[in-house]
Image (spheres, helix red, strand yellow):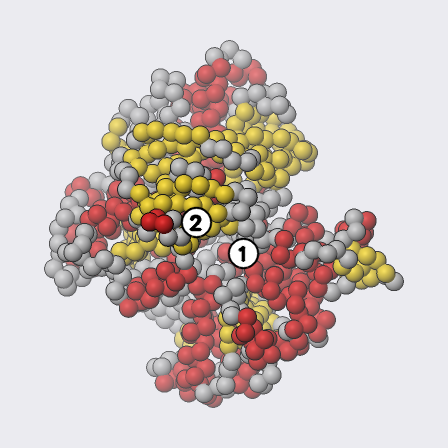
Amino acid sequence: MRTDVRFPARTSLEQILDVFERDPEFLSQVTHWERLPPRAPRYAPFPEWLDPRIARSLRARSIEALYSHQSAALEAAHQKKHVVVVTPTASGKTLCYDLPVLDAIAKDPSARALYLFPTKALAQDQLAELERLSTEMEIELKTFTYDGDTPPQARAAIRSAGHVVITNPDMLHTGILPHHTKWVKLFENLQYVVLDELHTYRGVFGSNVANVLRRLRRICAFYGSHPTFILTSATIANPEELARRHVEDDVVVIDESGAPRGEKVVAFIQPPVVNAGLGIRRSALLVGRDIAATLLASGIQTIAFTRSRVQTELLLTYLRARFPQPQWPPDLIRGYRGGYLPSERRAIERGLRDGSVRGVVSTNALELGIDIGALQAAVLVGYPGTVASTWQQIGRAGRREDLSVAFVVATSSPTDQYIVQHPEFVLGRSPEAGLVNPDNLHVLVEHIKCAAFELPFDRNERFGTEDTPGVLAYLDEHGILHESEGRYHWSDQAFPAEAMSLRTASNDNVVIIDTTGGRTHVIGEVDRFAAPVLVHEQAIYLHESKQFQVEKLDWENAKAYVREVKVDYYTDAGLAVRIRVLAEFATSTERATRAHGEVLVSALATVYKKLTLYSHENVGWGKIHLPEQELQTTSFWLALPEAVTRRWPKERVEVALAGLGNLLHALAPLFLMCDPHDLGLAVEVRSPHTSLPTIYLFDMTPGGVGFSERMFRSTEPLLERAREHLKACPCAEGCPSCVGPAYALGARVKAGVAELLGQLS
């Protein structure tokens, strides 16, 4: 496929797609080409009870009726029923909660609402839209964002005067609930709570947020209010179940969209094999670069998604090399990911909306519903990890009724290879279920502490678990609470909410400080759990396609000092993982020993590799000297019978076991319908716990959210899928598409994995 062709400035997307479809080299990489037909809108009239100023303002916007799902949400909220709206990206979900809130405040100026968004960017986006609506409708509305960036002098005014307080779960957790006595007007008059992007509240984050909402409802009840919850999500398989876990009450599910949809082309791309012997394919980053460069050269505004921060910076570097200055504007293509400063991200969002930024390379940070205008094309470099995320990213192109296109480019991972060979998995399957476990004891105890700090507990009060009195008594014994006359009061000196993060096991981030030329300024940050592999000393940190070398990592003070350099390589660090079984919950010895239980995972960053920017060849390595990190969670493990491997050389056992572990780790997320990052892998040739060759697949969430138990109960279907995938892979010895990296040339790893799977059937 030629990507140096310049299309005429006014080339339409249809013309460009026609060129793609007539290019034999490109078509040889397409495993599936799907045209999704446009969909006509379905309307419903404005309800009679709606404040006339709202209807008049909407008509002035040429909105003569509501989409059917907007009308249904408005009616349910008006009847004080909790509601969850699950419709595609750009289907107008904002009006599903803005209209009930504006109507309530128009009729009762004392009414209050609380909006919760998972990111500050979404909060700022929604603030602007709500202010526009209220101004047009001539409704006096005081709305503010309340987060870590809110000036201290503005906070008192927001507490007393804000009709709508827009914040995030983290700020609600640390800045509002513990100080509820300063928010009396909000909690006494709270009518609506909006929880946007419900599908993001899963795993450890979702389990924590469910408990924050328990604390919120507890405080509302104390002040005499019982708010209605309005939840929204673009794509999720179990909206009612997940919404009920967060609201702990009945919810009305609205999942039939009335919004129109333009025609969309979705193409699945398989990079060609460049080394048949090793089964190595051309880099998905380079294939994605070629497609994105063709679209950008044609004047098509394009977004490219990658799976990691490093990949984002690499693809940005590759694309900028294709569009050098001064022939092309300096900000033609921008990067976007976590770690960029808020001012950088806001500027990129504005550039996408006004068209000055024509291309953006992003992690999943732009997957959520931030307004970035109407892009025409999306290039997904690698399967995003879930069906839900795939549709979210595909949906970022074509946010109006025009034609749009999305290319899903497979990497060599077994997961991606399965997707590109079975596109129906994405096109024909419901999105994933969001799992939370708010009663996970690790999570629950911390929130009971926070709740006790906010309001004393009655002796028989329930908070999540039936054994709340037992937890309260335990905290009393340890001096954290003090019982007096049947009530438990906070007695510790510490402020509990400050000590815990809702999103990770670690509460603090490592700040990245640029010291180039003697100046010092912050250019980004990274969470502490990821720091050992991203900003260890001598690491190459990529930022806006620039390269920075980490000169010093101050682990104690969470600061990484970097200096800008020009080198032709980047770094990739590895983790050494050890597993200690703390308790077995269930065991089966049929064919092979399999079990699930509680484990302690120890992870240590040990070495890093230097990989060339374009060919990814290994040109050096170094050691990492940082403390070990621990995770207490749940795990599924599979111990192979000794009879299977007794006669094998140790080296063959090692590579076959590692290959099988890689294969199961890659395919389990498809079976479980979870993100690959939700699972960790450890392989032990002779496990201290089982004394056998053992594969551990563990939840990456402290305490676990249930994946391990599901794998234990469905081991055979998982093994059968592994057999099918291994047999379908055309390689001879084993390759990245089936058993992962080649561990030892000539070790016949694929045959060893096949034999292990055969013995387990």
Q: Position of residue 593 (x, y in %)?
A: 61, 26
Give the quarter of the figure containing the N terminus: top left
Q: Compute the Cα span from label 2 to label 1.
A: 28 Å
Residue under label 2, please give it.
512
Q: Residues within 10 Å of mark 2 (few under 14, many from 20)?
A: many
- In this rendering, would 469 be left or right of 362? right
Q: How far across and down, in percent of the image, does residue 367 sit?
A: 40, 56
- Looking at the image, is 235 positioned above or below residue 703? below
Which residue type does callout 2 highlight?
Ile
Could you say which disc has been placed on residue 22 in the image?
A: none
Tell me the element at label 1: loop
- Residue at the spot x=43%, y=66% of the render? 257
Asked whether the viewer can see residue 245, the reply is no
Residue 201's disc is: 1
User: Are discs 2 and 1 less than 8 Å apart at CB?
Assistant: no
Residue 519 appears in view: yes
Residue 16's spot in the image, x, y percent? Answer: 18, 55
Q: Where is residue 694 drawn, in percent x and y?
A: 56, 25
Tell me: residue 683, above or below residue 540: above
Q: Which one is in front, 427 or 562?
A: 562
Please tell me in which quadrant of the rendered image residue 43 appears: bottom left
Q: Residue at x 21, y 47 (%)?
A: 321
Which residue of the protein is positioned furthest toward the front in this rendering?
Answer: 518
Residue at (30% x, 31% y) in the render? 617
Circle 1 packing at 10 Å, graded few (<14), some (14-19), many (20+), is many
Q: Which is more foreground, mark 2 or mark 1?
A: 2
- Tell me which numbered mark, 2 or 1, is placed earlier along the sequence: 1
